[in-house]
Image: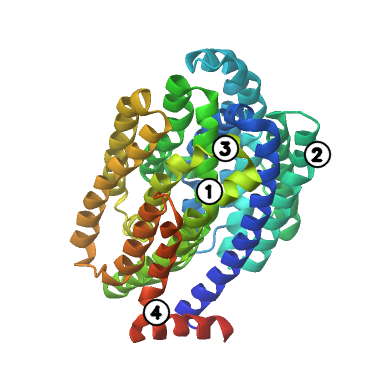
Amino acid sequence: MGLRNQVIKGGALLVVRQALGILLSLIGVIFITRVIGPAQYGLYGVGYGIVGFLGGLGIWGLDVYLLRKTSNPEQEDYDQAFTLLLCFGGTFALSLVLGQHIIAQMLNLPEAAPFLAALGLTLPLSLLNIPLTIKLDRDLNFKRVAYIELISQISYYVIALPLAHQQAGAWAPTAGLWLQQITMVALTYSSTKLRPRLCWKPSLIREMLKYGLSYSSSTWLWQLRSLVNPIIVGRFAGAEAVGFVSLAIRLVEMLSFAKSVTWRLAMAALAKLENDKTRLRHSIEEGMRLQALAVGVPMAGFALFGPIVLLLIFGKNWTPVLHVFPFIAVSYLSNSIFNLHCSVLYLLGRNLLVGWFHAAHVALFAGAAFLLVPQLGIVGYGWAEICALASYLLLHIYIVKELGNLNYTKALIWYGITVAVLVLSTLPGSARYLSCLLLLLPLTSTKERNTLVGYLQILRS
C-alpha cells in the first residue's frame, strides 16, 4: 500500500474512532453539565486548564523525540523517556498539591483549590502513558490506538455520570478523569510488549532534554493559550463565565477532532518525505483541504442547530455559550488549516520559527483578552480569538521561505463557506437555516466532486 493511501486509511480509522468518541462525549457532557451547572463546571474547567498546561510542559517533546527517531528506538530510549516523564509528572503533581490554595487565591477562586490538587495528581499517569502510546503509533497500529482511546473515554462517563446525579458537582468530572487515565495506562500496557523501567544515563538524558527543549519551547508558548480562560476569564468574569467558555471550547474540540488526527499522522508519516520539498508542499495543500472539509462542515452544522441543542438538551442556563461559540470555531478552523505548516517546520528542524509564531499568537490572544474580557465578558474572549488570527500571516511567510508558494484556493473554498455559515448562524429568524445551502456549493464543481470520490475510493480499497 502506498504511503498516501496508508496514511489516509489509517487516518480514517482514527477519525471514525474520534466520531464515536464525539457522540459519546456529547451525550456525557450533556448530562454532566446540565446537572452540575455552569459554576461547578467552571471550577472543573479552571483545574483542568492549569493541569492541561502543566501536562504539556511535562511531555518536554519526548513524544516527538521517540516518534521522529529515524531508527527504531531501543528499549533504553523508552526507559529513559519513562524515567524523565515520571520525574516531571511527580514534580508538577506535588507542586499543585502543596500550592493549591495559593494558586486559587491568585485566581480569586478559593473554592477551586481542592480540584487543582485532585486533578494535578493525574499528571504522572497521563505522562507515563506516553512511551507506550508512542510505541503503538510507530508501529502504525491505529486500530489498537483507536480501541484504547474509545474504551478509556467510556470509562470516564462510567463514574462521572452517576456522581453527577448524586450531586457531586465538579467532583464528578474530576473522578471521571482519574478513571480514564487509569484505564488508558492499563490498556496500553497490555497492548504492547514494551515494559519501561527506570533508567538514568546522563548522555542520553542530555540528548533528550536538548532536543525536547528546542521542540517544546515553542509548544509551551502555544499551551499558554489554555491559561487564558481559567486565569483571565476566571479572574475578571468568575467561575460561571469559565464554565461557559469551557463548554464552548469542549464542543469545538469535539467537532474539530480531525485536527489532532492529522497531527499524529503527519509526525508519523511526513518524516518519509523530509528530503522532497515538492511532495511536502503538495501534502500541505491536500492536507489543508481535508482539514477545512473535515473540521469546517461539523462546525457549520452545529452553528446552525446549536440554539436548539443547547436549549432543549443542555438547558437554558447554558445559552450564553452561543455568544462565544462562533468566535472559537473560527479560531480552531483557522488553526486546522495551518496545522501541517507547523508539522513540516518541525520536521525540517525549524523549531525556532514555530516558536516565534506561537509567541506572536499568544501575545495577541492573551493581550486582547486582558483588555476585552473586563469590558465584554465572554464575548471579549471570542474577539480575542479573532485578533490572534493575524499571527498566521507569520506562519505563512515561514513556510513559503522553506518550500515555496502554497496554493490555498482549494482549502479556502471550504474555509470561506464555513466562516460564512458561522457568521450567518448568529442572525435571528429562519433565514439562518438557509445558510446550510452554502455547504452544497463546492459540490457544483466537477473537480471537487471527483476529489471527494477519490478519497472515498481510497477508503474502500
Location of residue 134 in the rendering, given as x and y in whole percent from the top left corner: 58, 56
Q: Earlier in the sequence, mark 3 or mark 4?
A: 3
Q: Earlier in the sequence, mark 3 or mark 2?
A: 2
Q: Is 147 on the left-hand or right-hand side of 441?
A: right
Q: Disc 1 marks which residue?
A: 307
Q: Disc 4 marks which residue?
A: 443
Type of amino acid at the residue the image marks with label 2: Pro
Q: Disc 3 marks which residue?
A: 318
Local crowd size for mark 1, using a 10 Å CA cut-off: few (<14), some (14–19), many (≥20): many
Residue 148 appears anywhere in the view: yes
Asked whether the beta carbons under mark 1 and mark 2 sit within 8 Å of each other, the answer is no
Type of amino acid at the residue the image marks with label 1: Pro
Q: Is 310 on the left-hand or right-hand side of 276?
A: right
Location of residue 459 in the rendering, given as x and y in whole percent from the top left corner: 55, 80
Q: Distance between the residues labelled 1 and 2?
A: 27 Å
Q: Disc 2 marks which residue?
A: 162
Q: How far apart are marks 4 and 1 (CA)?
A: 27 Å
